[in-house]
Amino acid sequence: MTVLNLILAGLPAVFSALFLLRAWRQGRFSLRDRVGALAELLGVAAVFAAGALLVDWSRAPVLLWILAVAFLATAVLALVLRWANLPWLRARRRTVPRLIRLGLGAVAALGLIGFAAL
């Protein structure tokens, strides 16, 4: 196994752990609105799709994949528990550019996920 393969295999675990921290906690670094939460969830799904495409999982430690899935499942549970208290869109002055960036990111992530599904 190469070092690059190990690093790429660890990325889904790292990104899902960061998503878990943001979904679980309240305060400064927490998720503040539903649109942002959905965007981060889509980003983590794109990292999982990239991991499925780029990693040779026959040589990578399976524990990394199990950890990534466990972190993601816990993050989704935390997000479900907080969903009712989150506004759809946090009040900001620059709402339109944010929605445009989120839309472009969603198109890119869905393209990557679609390519991985082929």
Image (cartoon, rainbow, N blue to C red):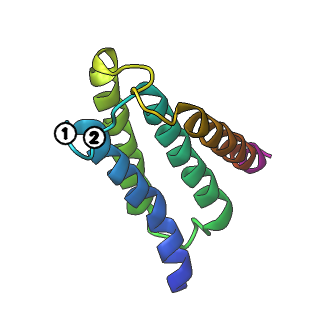
Q: Where does residue 40 sit, x and y in percent of width and height?
A: 47, 42
Per the image, is 115 magenta? yes
Q: Going by the picture, which residue comes out furthest to the bottom?
A: 2
Cα–Cα span, label 2 and label 1? 6 Å
Which residue in the protein does label 1 denote? Answer: 27
Label number found at residue 30: 2
Label number found at residue 95: none
Mark 2 crowdedness (10 Å alpha carbons): few <14, some 14-19, many ≥20: some
Rendered image quadrant of residue 76:
top left
Residue 3 is left or right of residue 71, and the answer is: right
Q: Where does residue 8 sit, x and y in percent of width and height?
A: 53, 70
Q: Residue at x 34, y 20 (%)?
A: 83
Q: Amino acid at mark 1?
A: Gly
Q: Which residues are magenta?
A: 114-118
Q: Residue at x 40, y 26 (%)?
A: 91
Comparing 20 with 90, the one in front is 90
Q: Amino acid at mark 2?
A: Ser
Check whether the beta carbons of the residues at disc 2 and disc 1 lie within 8 A of each other.
yes
